[in-house]
Amino acid sequence: MRVLRPLHVYVLGYFALVLGAGLALWQAGVLSRLPGGWALLAALLAVGLGVLLLVTAARPPVNSD
């Protein structure tokens, strides 16, 4: 059995959060009133923010010895 690293759990959790938020907006009818271009832009921003947070979280610590 392969063990998930904390970084993998972070990625899975982030995308589950983005997917859940998108589904909640769809159920509430917000996405039907939004033009497709703006919805795509919001999805791209959410994924970009996730990548940015992932890269900063995965950065190795710097020792100042």
Image (tube, grey):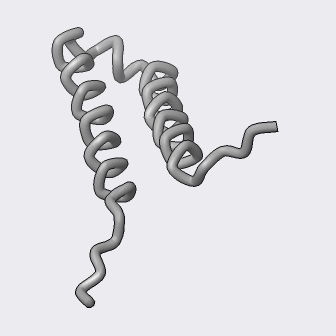
Q: Quadrant of the C terminus?
A: bottom left
For the point 36% across and 23% down, which residue is it? 30
Circle count: 0
Q: Is residue 16 above or below residue 60?
A: above
Left or right: where 48 falls relative to 19? left
**Residue 44 quadrant:** top left
> Outermost residue toward the right?
1
Q: Is residue 4 above or below residue 61?
A: above
Q: Is residue 7 above or below residue 27?
A: below
Q: Nearer the viewer, residue 1 or 55?
A: 1
Q: Is residue 22 above or below residue 48?
A: above
Q: Position of residue 22 (x, y in %)?
A: 43, 27
For the point 57% across and 54% down, which residue is it? 6
Left or right: where 36 falls relative to 50? left
Q: Position of residue 37 (x, y in %)?
A: 17, 12
> Outermost residue toward the bottom?
65
Q: Nearer the viewer, residue 20 or 3?
A: 3
For the point 28% across and 75% down, which residue is it? 62
> Outermost residue toward the front?
65
For the point 46% across and 34% down, which residue is it? 21
Q: Nearer the viewer, residue 29 or 8?
A: 8
Q: Quadrant of the N terminus?
A: top right
